[in-house]
Image (cartoon, rainbow, N blue to C red):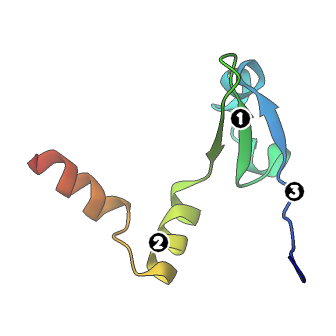
Amino acid sequence: MENESHIYLPTLTEDEFVENIESDDFLRRFGNPVIVRTKAAGSFVVMSIELYDRMTKLCGFPGSEEAIKNESRT
């Protein structure tokens, strides 16, 4: 594909993520968002709730508070 661009995100192992997620400077040290590679050979994108809310607002989706309320109704 022409003009295809890639964003390379910081990558952590599952153990690195678990060891560091509670640190006050996690986002500054590791990035936001980050990719977490699991021991089961999968991966997840992890981001702050603030970034998630900004992205969902830009895309016209419910933010975190609304999603939590909707989830608790089911």
Compute the Cα span from label 2 to label 3.
21 Å
In the displayed structure image, the side of residue 8 where residue 23 appears, left or right: left
Q: Residue at x 47, y 67 (%)?
A: 53
- Outermost residue on the front side: it is 1
- Amino acid type, label 2: Thr
Compute the Cα span from label 1 to label 2.
21 Å
In the displayed structure image, the side of residue 7 where residue 54 appears, left or right: left
- Outermost residue on the left side: it is 73
Mark toward the start of the polypeptide (2 vs 3): 3
Q: Which residue is mark 2?
A: 56
Other residues around mark 2 within 10 Å, as few (<14) / some (14–19) / many (≥20): few
Expressed as whole percent of the image width and height from the top left, the position of residue 52 reads: 52, 62
Q: Which mark is residue 71?
A: none
Expressed as whole percent of the image width and height from the top left, the position of residue 59 reads: 48, 79
Expressed as whole percent of the image width and height from the top left, the position of residue 33 reads: 70, 54
- Amino acid type, label 3: Tyr
Mark toward the start of the polypeptide (3 vs 1): 3
- Say which of 20 and 58 sits in front: 58
Q: Which mark is residue 8?
A: 3
Q: Is residue 64 above or below residue 13?
A: below
Q: Residue at x 90, y 83 (%)?
A: 3
Other residues around mark 1 within 10 Å, as few (<14) / some (14–19) / many (≥20): many
Whether residues under marks 1 and 2 lie with C-beta atoms below 8 angstroms apart, the answer is no
Compute the Cα span from label 3 to label 1.
13 Å
Q: Which mark is residue 36?
A: 1
Q: Is residue 35 above or below residue 20?
A: below
- Amino acid type, label 1: Val
Q: Residue at x 90, y 82 (%)?
A: 2
Local SS, label 3: loop
